[in-house]
């Protein structure tokens, strides 16, 4: 099944306690599509400027990502984000966000993208997410991510957009901020009242939790001794999660959602091992499957002896 993603395509400047990069390929749609490409065919929708060149396209194309719907805006500059992490890598400070070509972006989705089976609205301005959702009317499964910036500045639009998707994948802080609910269960129920049937709460270093109408499932993050750069982990989680579901024909049963959670966690765990997209550029499906099995053994509750 085909998967299409709209979101930021970016240059990132990132500083962590373990090093820094002044300019590297990033953006929510880039991290998502690289992750999803291990499972299914992926197309990326979004604008870039003159500074986005062959080297950047090659990173996506080498993973088999279809870049035909990336719009090159002549004379424009690519979205830019600058962030820094504390020793507690769950704490991130944004120093700069330059929307650049996203400021005037009018999504024009090709026929191939419009007929994709699965759609992911990665983190961008919610009006733009909704425009893409409307154009991709054929999608049987649609997911969405967002962030504090849009909750602060475009809350009403975000709630409308959430009403058009099946799955919301957001950070715990952001989901609490959006719903003003103190517990994740109440927050997830509030999101489901907006329309979606499934809510995935990303908990950074602590893993992720899945809420459905009558189900709950939670996974820790893969235990790493060293994390170099957490940027994009959330998008990689979403890419593994929806990429796997797309590859299976978008099932919604409990076992499939649990597998999707595990693949999401596994791909995210690789992404944080190096800066930006560096680790995923070298990753293989064999490594993913091996860590999936490791993860399954580590978290299997049926291996806890019964009382
Ligand atoms: P994550 O670490 O999964 O939350 O995503 C990190 C990516 O989000 C980075 O590569 C940034 O380029 C991108 N990003 C940061 N701020 C924004 C924003 N306001 N809109 C869209 N993408 C953003």
Image (tube, grey):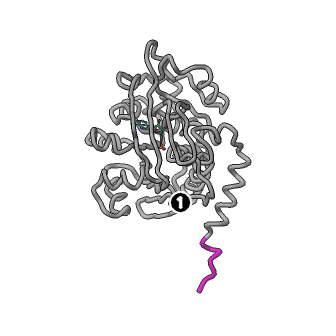
Q: Which residue is labeled 1 in the image?
A: 254
Confirm whether residue 250 shows in the render: no
Does 306 lie within the magenta span? yes
Name the residue located 49 percent from the left edge and 57 percent from the top edge: 208
Q: Nearer the viewer, residue 16 or 68?
A: 16
Q: Is residue 148 left or right of residue 202?
A: left
Q: Residue furthest right?
A: 286
Q: Is residue 88 left or right of residue 100?
A: right
Name the residue located 55 percent from the left edge and 55 percent from the top edge: 261
Q: Nearer the viewer, residue 183 or 243?
A: 183
User: Which image quadrant shows ligand 1?
Assistant: top left
Name the residue located 67 percent from the left edge and 66 percent from the top edge: 297
User: What segment carries the magenta color?
Assistant: 301-307
Q: Is residue 24 left or right of residue 77?
A: right
Which image quadrant is residue 307 in?
Answer: bottom right
- Give x and y (percent) for residue 88: 48, 56
Mark 1 residue crowding within 10 angstroms, few (<14) / some (14–19) / many (20+): few
């Amino acid at each position: 099944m085909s998967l299409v993603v709209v979101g930021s395509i970016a240059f990132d400047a990132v500083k962590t306690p373990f090093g820094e990069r002044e300019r590297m390929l990033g953006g929510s749609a880039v991290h998502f599509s690289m992750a999803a490409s291990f499972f299914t065919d992926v197309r990326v929708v979004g604008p870039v400027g003159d500074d986005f060149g062959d080297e950047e396209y090659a990173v996506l194309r080498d993973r088999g990502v279809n870049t035909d719907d990336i719009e090159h805006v002549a004379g424009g500059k690519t979205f830019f984000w600058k962030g820094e992490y504390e020793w507690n890598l769950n704490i991130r400070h944004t120093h700069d966000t330059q929307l650049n070509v996203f400021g005037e972006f009018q999504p024009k989705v090709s026929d191939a993208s419009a007929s994709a089976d699965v759609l992911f609205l990665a983190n961008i301005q919610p009006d733009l997410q909704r425009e893409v959702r409307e154009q991709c009317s054929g999608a049987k499964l649609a997911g969405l991510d967002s962030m504090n910036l849009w909750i602060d500045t475009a809350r009403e639009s975000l709630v409308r957009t959430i009403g058009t998707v099946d799955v919301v994948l957001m950070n715990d802080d952001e989901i609490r901020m959006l719903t003003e609910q103190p517990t994740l269960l109440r927050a997830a129920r509030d999101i489901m009242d907006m329309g979606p049937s499934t809510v995935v709460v990303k908990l950074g270093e602590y893993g992720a939790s899945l809420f459905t109408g009558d189900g709950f499932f939670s996974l820790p993050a893969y235990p790493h001794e060293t994390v170099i750069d957490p940027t994009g982990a959330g998008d990689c989680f979403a890419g593994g999660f929806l990429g796997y579901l797309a590859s299976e024909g978008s099932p919604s049963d409990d076992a499939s959602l649990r597998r999707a959670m595990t693949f999401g966690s596994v791909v995210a765990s690789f992404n944080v091992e190096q800066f930006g997209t560096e680790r995923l550029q070298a990753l293989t499906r064999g490594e993913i499957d091996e860590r999936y099995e490791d993860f399954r053994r580590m978290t299997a509750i049926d291996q806890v002896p019964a009382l």
